[in-house]
Image (spheres, helix red, strand yellow):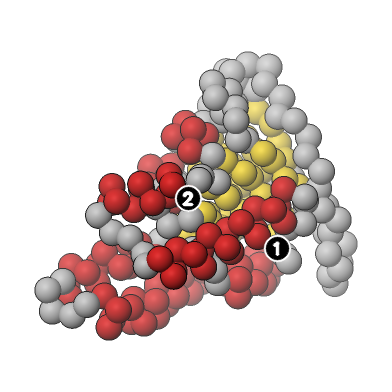
Amino acid sequence: MSKGRTVTVNRTTVYATTSGLALPEQPGAPARKARRPLPAAVVRDLRDRVGHSPYGLRFGARDLVVVTGLPGSGKSTLMRRAVRGTRVDSQDTRERWDGRMAGLLPYAVYRPLVRLAHYAGLRRALREGGGLVVHDCGTQAWVRRWLAREARRRGGALHLLLLDVTPGTALDGQRERGRGVSRYAFARHRGAAARLLRSVERGDLPEGCRSAVLIDRDAADVLRRIDFGH
């Protein structure tokens, strides 16, 4: 696919933009107890690599990938541009409902229906059994636990792709898309994202998560392909 060197991280292949690029080793968290031994979790930090960021990520054929970060950080934009295959994005569900309900009811009224529709769509996508990329707001830890169980059941792995941007950048992103969250909701997201980031940086991944990739806005802008293979 590329003349650049490929680096494999625990079933995750990173396509480098330049030849001879070796991504630095990161401390991995010890595997959590399970019915059978699992490979140690792996963290890859691709931040602050301007000019040397990978343009593609490849995961196992039955793997699940959770894209998380602050509202406005660019998760939906990244998924729409880079995902080759099935993706489930709560923003897509909201936009469909907004198209039907705009001008009739405020979003707060039909928000529960949007969430139900999103999780129903996610459940249908999981039943298909292939690789899947899922948008995660970061405040619903039970969703990651659900996905981790599903990944184990299908013989795949759960991976985390964490988009790390400053709160100011995320707020700018909300203004650019013309839709934001309340101060209270943003504070909740900010706290959850900060805790998750600190945990991942020290190699302590969420339960059931096999690997994590940390990217900043520059790395996200370079990333052009997220796909699944053998």
**Residue 220 on image: x %, y %:** 48, 38
Give neighbour class at mark 1: few <14, some 14-19, many 20+ (Cα, 10 Å): many
Q: Which numbered disc covers residue 192? A: none
User: What amino acid does circle 2 point to?
Assistant: Pro
Say which element carries label 1. Answer: loop
Q: In this view, does 155 lie above or below 142?
A: above
Specify the quadrant of the image occupied by residue 11: top right
Of the image marks 2 and 1, the number of the one nearer the N terminus: 2
User: What amino acid does circle 1 point to?
Assistant: Pro
Q: In this view, does 179 lie to the left or right of 189?
A: left
**Residue 175 on image: x %, y %:** 29, 51
Specify the quadrant of the image occupied by residue 196: bottom right
Specify the quadrant of the image occupied by residue 148: bottom right
Q: Return the residue at label 1.
A: 206
Say which element carries label 2. Answer: helix
Q: Which numbered disc covers residue 167? A: 2
Confirm whether residue 79 shows in the render.
Answer: no
Residue displayed at 61% across by 56% down: 194
Q: Is residue 8 above or below residue 138?
A: above
Confirm whether residue 195 shows in the render.
Answer: yes
Residue displayed at 72% across by 48% down: 201
Q: Quadrant of the C terminus?
A: top right
Q: Is residue 220 left or right of residue 91?
A: right
